[in-house]
Amino acid sequence: MSPTSIKTSILPPTVENLDLIATWLREGNVAAIPTETVYGLAANALDIAAVRQIFAIKNRPFYDPLIVHVPDAETLFQWTEIDEELRKTVHSLLEAFSPGPLTYVLPKKSWVPDIVTSGHATVALRIPRHPVFQEILCRSGCAIAAPSANPFGYISPTSASHVFQSLGGKLRYILDGGDCEIGLESTIIDISHEHIRILRPGKITGEAIQAVWPKKIFLENYSSKNQDNFRPPLTPGMLQRHYSPRTPLYLFSQKSELPLAMERNVARVLLSQEGHQGFRENDFFLSRDGNLALVAKRLFALLRELDDSHAYKKIYCQCPPLDGLGAAIADRLRRAAASSDGG
Ligand code: AMP
Ligand code: MG
C-alpha cells in the first residue's frame, strides 16, 4: 500500500481511544497526539522501525534529532548518564518546570538508539504536561519520540485539523486534544556544570530559568542581544529557515515601519488591536491587548490560515521585543521569514 493511500481518522480522546492509540504505538506504529506545545508525531522511542516512520512521514532528515517524551523524572534519569552534581541541577529545574514545555539535552545512556539522537552523545528529554499525552505515556508504557506533526520545515500544527491538512493520508490516527494551550515548541536547554545554553527559546523563558539557576545562561544562535555568544547551530534542527509558510513573510517591529498604502493581496499581522487606526480588511490581530501568551497560541494557526487562503502574495508580520516570551515568538518569526529576506 502506498503511504499516501492511508485513511486518516481523527479520534476524540475517549478511554477506548486512549487505549487504542497506546496499543497502536506499543505495536510499532505512529500516531499524531496533542501536547501543550504543538501536536506531535509519536512513536515508541526504542523501536527503530517505528522511529524511522516518523522521519519518512515528515520527510525529516536523519541528522535532525528527536525529543523523547517520558512520564516522570525517574524515567528521565534512566535515559541519562550524568554525575551527582549535574543530577542535582537537573532536579531543581525539573521541580520548577516539569511536567511542562522544557526539554533537557543531557549525556545519554549508550543504549539510546542513534536514530533518535542523530548519533549525538546526548539525548533530548521532556516530561509533557498535556493530560492526553500523559495518559498515552502511562497506558503504553513507552517513552515516546515525537517531533511536531508537520512536514519538515513547515509551520507546526496546533490543532488536530492542522495535522490532518498537512499529513492526512500519511498516517492512520490523529488523537484530538483540542487546540494546543501554548502554541510554540518547547524551550530546549543544554546543561553543563558551568552554564545553560538555550538552544531554542520557548514558553519557559531565559528569565524564568535564571531565577532558579544562578550561573551563566547563553541564548544560542539568534539574538542580536547575544551576538558576543554567537556560534554556529549545534544541531541542524536549529537551521535558519524553519516553521515557514509558503507565502513570503516579512517582519517589522513598529507599526510606523509599515507602508501606509498597501495592496489588497498583502496581509498585515499585528500583535495587538489596541490603539490601531486605519483598519484595512487585510489586517489581522493576534491579540486585543498585546498579551504575548495569546499571540503565541494563535500565531501558527493564523499563518497557516493566511497561507491556505491563497489570497495573499506577501504577509507582513509584527515581531515583538525580545524580552520574556517575546524571544520565542521572535525566534519562530525570524526563522519563518528567513528565506523571504534572503537570510
Ligand atoms: P522538535 O523538532 O520540536 O522535535 O525538536 C527537536 C530539536 O531538538 C532538534 O531539531 C534539535 O534542535 C534539538 N535536539 C534534539 N536532540 C538534541 C541533542 N541531542 N542535542 C542538541 N539538540 C537536540
Ligand atoms: Mg518541528
Image (cartoon, helix red, strand yellow):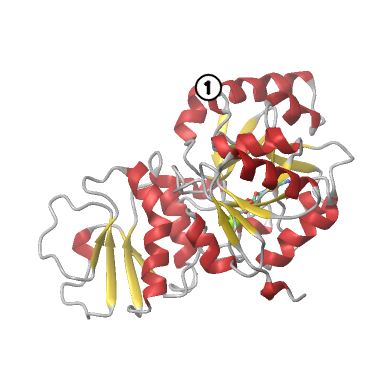
Give coordinates of residue 151: x percent, y percent. 60, 66
Quadrant of image for the N terminus: bottom right
Q: Within 10 Å of the Cα at label 1, are there few (<14), some (14-19), or many (20+) other Cα atoms?
A: some
Return the residue nearer the eye: 6 or 200. Answer: 6
Return the residue nearer the eye: 218 or 108. Answer: 108
Give coordinates of residue 197: x percent, y percent. 60, 39
Task: Give the side of residue 182 with respect to residue 118, left or right.
Answer: left
Residue occupying image coordinates x 29% and y 42% = 291
Residue occupying image coordinates x 13% and y 65% = 279
Question: Which residue is label 1 attached to?
Answer: 212
Return the residue nearer the eye: 111 or 216. Answer: 111
Give coordinates of residue 119: x percent, y percent. 82, 52
Give coordinates of residue 106: x percent, y percent. 73, 36
Residue occupying image coordinates x 66% and y 25% = 90
| Ligand 2 quadrant assignment | bottom right
Task: Give the side of residue 192 with respect to residue 47, left or right.
Answer: left
Q: Is residue 44 visible?
A: no
- Describe the element under mark 1 as helix, strand or loop: helix
Q: Is residue 55 above or below residue 94?
A: below
Q: Of all residues shown, which one is farthest toward the left?
A: 278
Q: Of all residues shown, which one is farthest toward the front?
A: 16
Within the image, what quadrant is residue 124 found in? top right
Three-letter residue code for mark 1: Val
Q: Is residue 82 visible?
A: yes
Return the residue nearer the eye: 71 or 107. Answer: 71
Question: Within 8 Å of ligand 1, the CB of disc 1?
Answer: no
